[in-house]
Amino acid sequence: MAALELLTAVRVRNAYANLALPAILRRHGLRDRDAALATELGYGTLRAQGLLDAVIDACTERPLHRVEPPLLDALRLGAYQLLRTRVPAHAAVDTTVELVRVDAGSRSAGFVNAVLRRVGEQSEAAWVEQLAPDPKEDAIGHAALAHAHPRWIAQAFADALGARADDELDAALAADDARPSVHLLARPGEVTAEELALVTGGEVAPYSPYGVHLEPGSGDVGELDAVREGLAVVQDEGSQLVALALTRVPLGDQQADGERWLDLCAGPGGKSALLGGLVALEGGTLDAVEPAEHRADLVRRAVDGLPVTVHVADGRTAPLPDAAFDRVLVDAPCTGLGALRRRPEARWRRRPEDVAELSRLQRELLTAALRHARPGGVVAYVTCSPHLAETAGVVAAVTRPRGRAAAEAVEVEQLDARPFLPGVPDLGPGPGVQLWPHRHGTDAMFLALLRRIG
């Protein structure tokens, strides 16, 4: 019931699953293993929606757009259990049918029963072989269906992988389709990663000196004492790595009175907490910019007690001095294609046309960041997306402007980012860095480091 309620909330209210689920679990009184199962059923069904719909469509003579939405939600939930969990087939069918019978009556329950029994006649692999395009003729289309991604997103992954797409696309999409481990940030100056791992039962992260990994299905992370007490926050290791890279670039002419840093897209505050903790240890300050008041409040809470000033403003026009900051982070709003494994419904909500509008915003934010950086200062451009239009395309457009824009632009050079992620393997040819779930166990974060030299 909790899993089905989550599917309904996402469909009816356009809810974010990770925000809606905790309240649903509390309302149903689910904890520990029961909460973990409800989470797996809800998140898994949302993540696999495209594949499930293709299978369901093959098992009914009724077009999917003519299936009542509540019934389709139930069919997806039942099909997910049949194809991707160890729930016994009879239990998956019977519990789904009973849910429908209570809400929609016996006739609808009979329809769901018939469809799910057809679904259960084959394994997921057999359905993929039957329904997906021939991999020899359409490798991207086959991989997209097999790993439950819209085709355009699979194409974006292939484009970003470049020459390695033939060998790695399946692995990249499979990692993006799997349950991720939970990553924690041990807040600098508050607790070490080793101490955090000890008190949470997790493992120290392989690359970030402040990271800890917890197993998938670890329950409500917000209930951990370390998180409740503000010693740790949930933050993907990739996010930690790209923020840390910014702090490692030599400036050449250190400021005697402490460095001044800027987080231009700060909400909800995770990277500001990391940067604020680090700059505090060095005797510097951080300015954090967030346009939405409610998200600015989240930033204030995240950086409480740190030398951080929060500004409620649009990063493109924030009332901050030009040429004043030693280090600037631009964690730009993006499609989020690099974190789809953590946002199960997002892959079916995003559209290809979203990219153009976001890439324009990203270019404007990066331009503003370079304006605020002092000569010799460093800007980190970061997106949680591997889409080339949001990554290398944005950097190229800003660093090689033409016409009137060139006359107004500051002079910059792009640095090789790879040396500033020490110990992280397989970072590609540079100068930008693209992290990948299947290579590094992180979200697919992109990083470019730029130095203002004009």
Image (cartoon, helix red, strand yellow):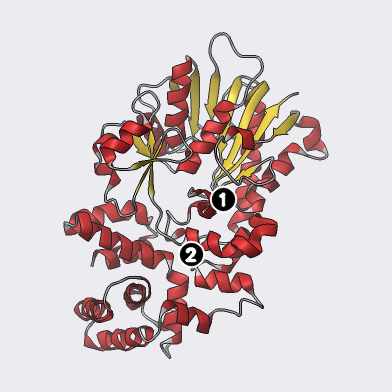
| Residue 180's disc number | none
Location of residue 278 with respect to 356 vertically, above or below? above
Residue that appears at 57% across and 74% down: 142
Mark 1: few, some, or many residues within 10 Å (few <14, many ≥20)?
A: many
Mark 2: few, some, or many residues within 10 Å (few <14, many ≥20)?
A: some
Residue 63: tell me if it is visible.
no
Location of residue 112 with respect to 205 vertically, above or below? below
Quarter of the picture containing the N terminus is bottom left
Q: Position of residue 404 (x, y in %)?
A: 81, 36
Residue that appears at 32% across and 34% down: 196
Disc 1 residue type (three-letter): Ser
Disc 2 residue type (three-letter): Trp
Secondary structure found at label 2: helix
Using the numbered discs, state the Cα–Cα distance from disc 1 to disc 2 in whole angstroms: 15 Å
| Residue matched to label 2 | 348
| Residue matched to label 1 | 385
Residue 292: tell me if it is visible.
yes
Q: Is residue 194 left or right of residue 207?
A: left
Tally of numbered tags: 2
Q: Are marks 1 and 2 in contact (CB under 8 Å)?
A: no
Location of residue 435 with respect to 449 vertically, above or below? below
* Closer to us: 413 or 436: 436
* Closer to us: 396 or 202: 202
Residue that appears at 34% across and 66% down: 7
